[in-house]
Image (cartoon, helix red, strand yellow):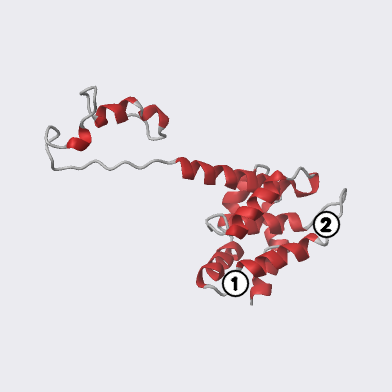
Amino acid sequence: MSKELLSRLGSDDVHDSIVCYSSPAAIRRLLSRRREVIDLRAALQNGSLTDDELRRHVVELMHGFRPGQRFDGDVELAALAVAIERRSTDFAEEFFHDLASLKLRELSMSIGIARLILHARQDLAKNESRVIKLGEPAHQSKSFSQPNGRGRVYAMARNAKKFKWGAM
């Protein structure tokens, strides 16, 4: 079952569906909607496929790599990257960092997607969350006071340019 799931990532159908896209972001979006990737995510989530099996598959796949020659496994590595992009395992971190650090023309698609995913993961880690207690008057709540007397909400509004959602 797991071998079949992994082999479907490199099928001609998957390859043919993405050849007309040029940017890693577009390919990533398309691959994330593919049935093969969705099924692989589900198999990883329910435990029918493990990180060790993924690692063995990648090693086996890379045995076919020849410098200077077109590598058919590039699409499969890209699809695998999209399938595991939300996993926080040692294998996923190692896979993204190793793939993103490469500079090979033969793996340009999967390298671009790995870099995009790493960038997105780093941005996600930088996100801040803030809790504002509603229902308490501001003058009674110590969490809103600051030494300058303006309050934490004022500071959040002043720094809102950092956040994608803009000013409050």
Which residue is at the front of the view, 152 or 77?
A: 152
Residue at 16% over, 37% down: 141
Spot the residue most to the front: 147
Q: Residues within 10 Å of mark 2 (few under 14, many from 20)?
A: some
Residue at point 48%, 44% (across, down): 125
Rendered position, 139 above or below 35: above
Residue 133, picture quadrant: top left
Res 20 seen here: no
Quarter placement of the N terminus: bottom right
Tell me: 72 left or right of 162.
right
Picture layout, residue 22 above or below residue 46: above
The amino acid pointed to by label 1 is Leu
Q: Give amino acid for label 2.
A: Phe
Instruction: Establish if 89 lies above or below 8.
Output: above
> Dot 1 corresponds to which residue?
49
Left or right, residue 1 beside residue 167:
right
Labels 2 and 1: the sequence-earlier one: 1
Which residue is at the front of the view, 5 or 129? 129
Q: Secondary structure at mark 1?
A: loop
Q: Residue at x 43, y 41 (%)?
A: 127
Q: Locate residue 56: give its quadrant.
A: bottom right
Q: Position of residue 11 (x, y in %)?
A: 71, 64
Which residue is identified by label 2?
65
x and y percent of residue 44 in the render? Answer: 55, 68
| Residue 19 can be seen in this image | yes
Residue lying at 66% horizontally and 70% vertically, measured from the top left: 53
Disc 2 to disc 1: CB gap under 8 Å:
no
User: In the rendering, at what x and y percent does residue 32 appear?
Assistant: 56, 56
Q: Secondary structure at mark 2?
A: loop
Q: Nearer the viewer, residue 128 or 142?
A: 142
Q: How many marks?
A: 2
